[in-house]
Image (cartoon, grey):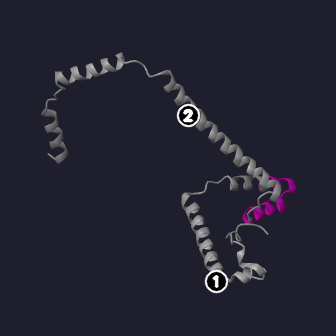
């Protein structure tokens, strides 16, 4: 007889015990007390509804503001650049078929590219890169003299942030 069968046999021989009668009476008394209590005030329910409505309104306004900002930036800077791989695939499809099919492939792949989820690890890595670059910039600014800042003859070629996208975006 293995260990599992031994345990099963011992459990079969045990007789279950129910809760004592005093526990049953206490539970029933607690239920009776809760059911006989006055209902919560009307204001409490209305306050909870108002809080839920304000949270929902905040979420809706946040989504609206993000979409409005995206539309404004798209008008200002134009559409986002198409990644190089997508452009190459679309050009290949266009060379084999026609321009309209290549354009549709570009649109579908671009939509899929921009709607892909960004993992928290990618977000943390990009945030850390930005913080590192800000720290480097801050250290470089400490070495400038106030006269250099006033004259405006400092080297600003390093002020552009490297996005790390050179292998993913078209020119």
Q: Is residue 91 found inside the magenta-colored segment of the image?
A: yes
Q: Position of residue 82 (x, y in %)?
A: 76, 61
Q: In which quarter of the image is residue 14?
A: top left
Q: Which residue is drawn at 74% across and 56% down?
A: 110
* Quarter placement of the C terminus: bottom right
Distance from label 2 to label 1 (Cα)?
52 Å
Q: Position of residue 59 (x, y in %)?
A: 62, 41
> Camera-side residue: 77 or 1?
77
User: As displayed, is residue 28 above or below residue 169?
Assistant: above
Q: Quadrant of residue 87?
A: bottom right
Q: Position of residue 37 (x, y in %)?
A: 36, 18
What is the chief secondary structure element of the magenta stretch? helix
Q: Position of residue 35 (x, y in %)?
A: 36, 18
Q: Mark 2 falls on what kind of element?
A: helix
Q: Mark 1 falls on what kind of element?
A: loop
> Camera-side residue: 5 or 144?
144
Q: Residue at x 49, y 26 (%)?
A: 44
* Quarter placement of the N terminus: top left
Q: Which residue is drawn at 26% across and 19% down?
A: 29
Q: Quadrant of residue 58?
A: top right
Q: Name the residue under label 2.
A: 51
Range shown magenta: 84-105
Q: Residues within 10 Å of mark 1 (few under 14, many from 20)?
A: few
Q: Is residue 149 found inside the magenta-colored segment of the image?
A: no
Mark toward the start of the polypeptide (2 vs 1): 2
Q: Mark 1 points at which residue?
A: 143
């Amino acid at each position: 007889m293995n260990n599992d069968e031994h345990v099963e046999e011992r459990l079969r021989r045990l007789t279950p015990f129910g809760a004592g009668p005093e526990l049953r009476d206490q539970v029933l008394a607690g239920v009776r007390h809760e059911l006989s209590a006055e209902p919560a005030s009307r204001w409490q329910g209305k306050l909870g509804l108002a809080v839920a409505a304000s949270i929902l309104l905040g979420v809706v306004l946040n989504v609206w503001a993000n979409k409005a900002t995206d539309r404004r930036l798209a008008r200002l800077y134009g559409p986002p650049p198409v990644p190089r791989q997508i452009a190459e695939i679309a050009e290949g499809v266009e060379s084999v078929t026609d321009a309209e099919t290549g354009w549709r492939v570009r649109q579908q792949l671009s939509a899929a590219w921009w709607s892909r989820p960004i993992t928290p690890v990618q977000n943390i890595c990009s945030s850390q890169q930005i913080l590192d670059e800000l720290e480097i910039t801050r250290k470089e600014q400490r070495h400038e003299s106030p006269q250099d800042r006033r004259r405006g003859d400092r080297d600003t070629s390093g002020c552009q942030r490297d996005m790390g996208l050179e292998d993913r975006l078209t020119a």
